[in-house]
Every structure is written in C-alpha cells, then in structure tokens.
Amino acid sequence: MFYSFLIIHLILWTLIPTLTNNNLPLDTIEALAWGSNLDWGFNKHPPASAFFPEVIYQVFGSQDWFYYLLSQLFVVTAFIIVFKFAEELFKNKTLSLISVLLLEGIYFYNFTTPEFNVNVCQLPFWSLCVYYSWKIFDKKVINFKHCFLLGVFAAVGFLSKYLFVYLLISIVLLFFYIIFVKKYQKFDFKYLISFEVFIVLLIPHLIWLTNNDYITITYGLARTGLETSSLLDHITYPLIFLGKQIGILIPFFLMSFFLIKKIKLKVTLKDKKLLFLIFINLIPIGLMFLTSMLTGSKIRTMWMTPFYLFFGVFIIYIFQAQINLKMLNGFISIFLILFIFSPFAYAYISITETDKRTDYLGKEIAIKTEYLWKQNYTLPINVVLGDEWHAGNLSYHLNSRPVWEGVITKDKLNSLSKYICIDNICVGNR
C-alpha cells in the first residue's frame, strides 16, 4: 500500500502540472538560470537548489515534465525516509503508513510541490538528518558512518536554504540535553564528526559568501521586513505566524480525528522517543516563532515547508494508545478526498486562470528571439542578461543554452562581441 501510494503520488503530481502548465514556475526557472552559471552561491540562495535542476538539464534538456518529476522525487524520497523512521519507532507498518498518509493533509506536500525550489530541495535532507540523528540517539555505541552521513546531509540541507539551521540547532539542543542535562548518554568525540564534515563541506560556500559581501544573507533579511519592523510587529507577526500554522494543519487534524477514539494525553519527558519527537518537531517551529517575536520579522508561510515532515509520526506516537484501527475506513475516506481534491484544484486553477507565471509564453518568445538574432548574426547566443524570470526563460528555452549572467550593465554589454536587447533582456555572444 505504501509503495502504491508513492507511485500514484509521483505520477499524479508529475502529470497534472505537465498537462496544465504552459511554462515552468518562477522558482524553477530561477534555479535553472542559476544552474546555467553554477557557482557556490547566488544572489538569493545557496547553490544546492540550482545544482539538481542543472543535472537534469544536462541529461534531459528543456523538457518541462522532468522538472516536475524531479520535484516529486524529492517529496517521495522524504516520504520514504519518514516511513523508515516510523517503522523503527513503532515496529508497526500500519502506524508507519498512517504517519506518512497524514502528510497529504498538509498542502506543502502536494499542492505546492510542482514548483521545484529551495523549500522542496530541503525535504529529503531534512528527513535524512532526522533519521540519522535518531540512529545516533537510539544507539548506545556511536556509529562513525551515522555521524559522517549526518554531517553530509546537514551540509547539503543548509546549502539548499539557510533556514535548515533551525533543524540543526534543534538537533544540537537535543544532544546537549541528553548528554549534559539528563545524562542519558556520555559524550563521545564521534559526535564532532558530524560537525567537522558539515563545516568542511561548507567552506567553498563560506568563501564565496565572504567574496560576495554576504549577499544571500542580506537578501534573506530583506525578505523578513526586519529593517522596517515596528514595536507592534513583535506581537502582530508572531500571532499571524501561529494563525497560519493552525490554518495549514486543519486538514491534517481532520484526518487525525477519524483515527483517535478520544483525546487523552499522558506524556512524560522520561520517554526518550517522545523527547526526540518533541525536539525535531516542536523546537524548530518554536525557534521560528521566537525569531519572529524577538526581531519583529515576518515569517513567510512557504518557509515552513519541511518543518512538518515528522508531524504525522509525532501525532500517531502521542495518541497511539487511543488509535482505533476499526475507524480506518473513515480516515481512508478523508485521505482519498484530499488526495483527489488537491490535484483537481491545482488543475482547475492552472486551466482557468490565465495570467499566472506558468502561462508565460517562454518557448514562443525564445523562438522569436532566436529568429531575430539569426537575421543579424551567425554566431550562437551564449550569454543572456536580465532578471532571473525573463532572461532565465530564454536561457532555458534557447537551444544554445546561453549562460545567465545577471542584470544588464554597461560593463557586461561591453564584454560581448555581439548583442541584441529586447525590452529588459539582452542576448549576446562572447
């Protein structure tokens, strides 16, 4: 059942946007623009979210459906890791399956997934970090391999988006708590392997960051509205943040309602499994709320995409004694309604609304641009200048796959032997 669910999810969410969208979404085009000129960082984000689409482009070229497939492969991989983690926690395949199916009640894992971006890029690495943290947490003898892999996946996750650090801080706090406060485990220098691997893999990006005046951090802070925040924002934005999280989780809790006979909580922090689940589920969200409250910054909803990956496991673990598997038919009914409704809603919006980014005539504009270029020059277009969206579309759709080199400046134009400018885009040859 689990693998059938994964296959259907993969096919459905690859097929629907492929059939209903005329153009790739904004963030995917941005990632491809950056990927055409791969570096250890970009003006908005670190490099990982550009690296994976570029690999796909080098193999399959400008076929849109491969990028929808890439996004779903990241989602499905995260689901598999969550399932494996749940199996080790529950020793019960049914509860493990339900833990994953519950995630279909959170629109981060269905409706928003066709757009491959930094949020989707984090998903498998977030789940892998939790999984290998659990491996280290659950064993009395620390395994070198687990520590090494945790460091690798933590680095790739952080190189996907800096907000990944909220999970990493939560993991560090967990191990600090169990080693130095509760003394459930003794300190082992193998713990530092993860940190060392993490830092080593980040060095190229840190060098790039220093050489580029910390541009990605500046961009991230600007997105929070931190510079213009007022005293009232320290109250308003955290409350808005909480309200949005509750709204997002309503379908999730509706699905849970059909499983639980009665709400009866009996929790204790002496339960090591529960302690682990609290640290990897609630602490990252709490830290995000605290950030908003202390800085008065606005937390954008999509930033929370990976934060709820293990929420199904958390809820099932807390209420496992109250779960009535005889009520499973009701749960499956709600699951199927949401599972079918979500792609239907996506398709309906995609078809009926005609002014979205995914309606942009990127391929047609690329054909016209190439025709105009060939009327003047015989050399191929190998450079494109402009914003990530318009210039990025040309970089993606033109057969010569020109390198995107950022916004138009006199210096960049002077460096080209031939060029043509149309509106706010310039194409040329170096």
Image: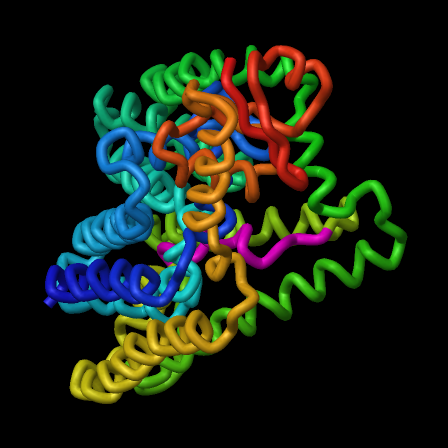
Residue 395 in percent (x, y) is at 45, 34
**Left or right: residue 224 compared with residue 264:** right
Q: Measured along the vertical axis of the image, is residue 261 above or below residue 76?
A: below
Residue 203 in percent (x, y) is at 48, 12
Boundaries of the magenta span: 298-310
Compare residues 172 and 306 and report the one nearer the observer: 306
Q: Which residue occupies 29% across, 75% down?
A: 339
Q: Which residue occupies 46% across, 27% down?
A: 47
**Left or right: residue 101 compared with residue 378:** left
Residue 313 in percent (x, y) is at 31, 60
Q: Measured along the vertical axis of the image, is residue 137 above or below residue 266?
A: above
**Left or right: residue 173 compared with residue 148:** right
Query: Where is the N terminus found, in terms of image quarters?
Result: bottom left
Compare residues 375 and 348 and report the one nearer the observer: 375
Membership of 309 in magenta stretch: yes
Residue 429 in percent (x, y) is at 50, 18
Identify the image quadrant of residue 419. top right
Compare residues 392 and 247 and report the one nearer the observer: 392
Residue at the extreme right: 231
Q: Is residue 145 visible?
A: yes
Compare residues 96 and 394 and report the one nearer the observer: 394
Identify the image quadrant of residue 136. top left
Q: Which residue occupies 68% across, 35% down?
A: 219
Q: Main secondary structure of the magenta part?
A: helix
Q: Measured along the vertical axis of the image, is residue 333 above or below residue 205?
A: below
Q: Measured along the vertical axis of the image, is residue 197 above or below residue 259?
A: above
Type of colouring: rainbow
Q: Which residue occupies 14% across, 63% down?
A: 2
